[in-house]
Image (cartoon, rainbow, N blue to C red):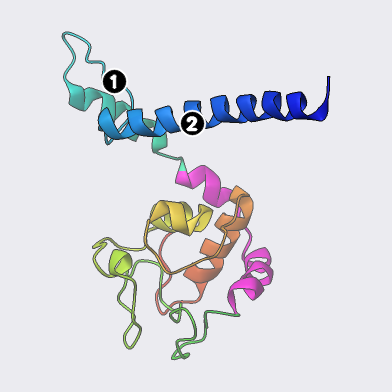
């Protein structure tokens, strides 16, 4: 077999490959398929309203905040807060930094610190910083409140979160009663 025949074989293989790719592109243009917003199927069980499913999921997400808060220690919270001090102040009358000042934060309205520009998510949240809210937010801020400007990864350990919350509660004009 000489090199000319080998070139014809390679050219034939390349032409077949280009033809298959070309036909695929043409078929995609001719037969357009709209993809669904939410992939999958919704299965409804007879005799059970759809809201029951969401209520079950909500019950599963509830945490025993009293048990979590029992794990916390204020002195450990003060040590852990040093990570937060780069962006937040904790002193009474302290300035806002990259994040808002956190003195008196426990029990206050979310997004209520004066002279701080919150993300739209936090500004419109409309809840108070309860022990439960702080615990959920400190777990992973970006997934707890989608759209928040806080890029902190969060605290995975319950004892660390409880310690921070106890430290924040202590730094207040009127600390809240622990659960």
Q: Which residues are magenta?
A: 65-85
> Residue most toward the right?
1
Residue 109 visible, this angle: no
Q: Residue at x 35, y 66 (%)?
A: 107
Q: Can you give x and y, in whole percent of width and height, for residue 106 in the image? A: 40, 67
Q: Give the structural element (helix, strand or loop) at label 1.
A: loop
Quarter of the image holding residue 117? bottom left
Residue 21 marker: 2
Would you say 109 lies left or right of 134 here? left
The location of residue 138, given as percent across then percent down, is 50, 58
Picture disc at residue 102? none
| Disc 1: which residue | 41
Magenta stretch mostly in which secondary structure?
helix
Task: Name, please, the residue furthest toward the top.
Answer: 46
**Residue 74 location, x and y as percent?**
62, 65
SS type, badge 2? helix
- Name which quarter of the figure residue 86 lies in: bottom right
């Amino acid at each position: 077999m000489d090199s000319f025949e080998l070139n014809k074989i390679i050219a034939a293989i390349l032409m077949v490959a280009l033809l298959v790719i070309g036909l695929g592109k043409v078929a995609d243009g001719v037969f357009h398929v709209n993809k669904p917003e939410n992939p999958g199927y919704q299965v409804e069980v007879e005799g059970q309203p759809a809201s029951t499913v969401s209520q079950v999921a909500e019950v599963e997400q509830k945490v025993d905040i009293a048990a979590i808060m029992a794990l916390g220690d204020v002195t450990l919270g003060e040590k852990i807060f040093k990570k937060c001090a780069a962006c937040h102040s904790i002193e009474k009358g302290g300035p806002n930094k990259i994040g808002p000042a956190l003195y008196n934060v426990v029990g206050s309205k979310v997004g209520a610190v004066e002279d701080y520009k919150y993300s739209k998510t936090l500004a419109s949240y409309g809840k108070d910083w309860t022990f439960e809210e702080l615990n959920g937010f400190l777990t992973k801020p970006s997934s707890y409140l989608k759209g928040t400007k806080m890029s902190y990864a969060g605290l995975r350990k319950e004892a660390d979160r409880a310690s921070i919350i106890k430290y924040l509660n202590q730094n207040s004009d009127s600390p809240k009663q622990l659960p």
